[in-house]
Amino acid sequence: MSSGSKKSPEILIIALSGIGDALMFTPALKLLKKSLPDAKIDALIMFKGVKDFYEQMPEINKVHYFDFLNQSKFSAFKFVLGLRGNYDYSVSVYPSNRVEYNGINFLLGAKNRLAIKYLRKDFWNLGFLNGPRILEDDKLHNVEENIRMVEQITGEKYSEYPPLEFPLSDDAQNIAHKFVDDIYGEEKLVIGFHAGCQTLKNHINRRWAPESFAELGRRLIRDFDATVLLFGGPDEDDLKDYIATMINSENCIDVQTKSLTETAAIIKQCDLMVTNDSGLMHVSAAMQRKVIALIGPTNTNYIYPWKTEYEIASINLECSPCFYYSPKPLTCKRKDVMYKCIRELEVKQVFDIVKKVIVN
């Protein structure tokens, strides 16, 4: 549909798969609204962190939030049916290669259900319930795949892609500035760490060892008098405590916030972020921070930090990447060292990359 149509389209963005995936749809969302300024664009989400920033986005009219993970199937079914028939288009954010997401998209009843046709496990996850679909391309970033779907709605072909968008409220920015003033001041070299990542589908094995983060932190404090900030969600408090205990320095600070937006605002105060492949890696990119991304089994084409300065720390094994988008849990087929791609990433290699970024 073009912007010259009589009826402004009503579009639902289905962003159920996580913070990073929702964030990597924001460039497509921006282009969609620019091409169809009168369109009504809503979003369906299930993570509180996504709600924090999607509700601040000027492109989104309304956010439908439902905790599908912790509510009954009957309640979820009733909720989805309450939205049925309200939209001309629904867009399943890439990646969403699960039978549950495809079922929800089908039940919503939009005539046009935009989605990606996945190269792996597509049929068994009922991908055919969607349409029109675009064939997945392993060479493209998630942002680019999302924009390809939006092009099917607008009829345009985009040549310039925006950065990630994460609006910060005045309150969140004020909290971040107070944090800087109270904790470390503006003259310090500030390096953020995110040692966590999601744990669903065995993805905990994408994490660099907490002992390695601790050793890296000690070196940065010793050699650069850096302040190290430990970021993570409430479920990562024990992980942060463990790393802070090993670093054992007043220059290591466990960052506690009340929302993802506050976390993002404090990340914006960092000089650079050292992070696993995680949602906060993409938040860091949205904040235009320099990012050192610790990548093991993931295809870096999909998830490298978008439109910001970054370096990838990886040992580039011959078997990498081995993780692609499907509901299948992360596994490793190596016989020598399981998940060698991340477990044998040496602290010296990461330190040398961080040092180069600092010096430059």
Image (tube, helix red, strand yellow):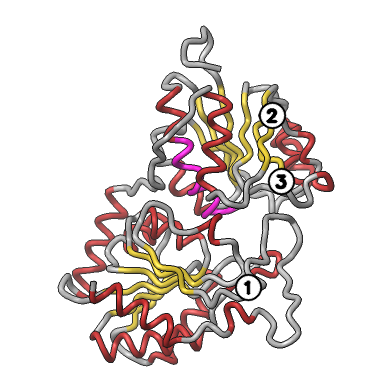
Asked whether residue 27 is drawn in magenta, I would say yes
Asked whether disc 2 touches disc 3, contact meaning CB atoms under 8 Å apart, the reply is no
For disc 1, the marked residue is 204
Labels 3 and 1: the sequence-earlier one: 3
Give the magenta range: 18-29
Q: Is residue 12 left or right of residue 266?
A: right
Kindly identify the residue that appears in the image at 53 percent across and 29 percent down: 151
Q: Secondary structure at mark 3?
A: loop
Kindly identify the residue that appears in the image at 29 percent across and 52 percent down: 171
User: As drawn, which residue projects farthest toward the top?
Assistant: 6
- The amino acid type found where label 3 is placed reads Tyr
Q: Quadrant of the N terminus?
A: top right
For disc 3, the marked residue is 118
Kindly identify the residue that appears in the image at 70 percent across and 27 percent down: 84
For disc 2, the marked residue is 132
Q: Nearer the viewer, mark 1 or mark 2?
A: 2
Q: Quadrant of residue 37?
A: top left
Q: Is residue 332 left or right of residue 348?
A: right
Q: Quadrant of residue 202?
A: bottom right
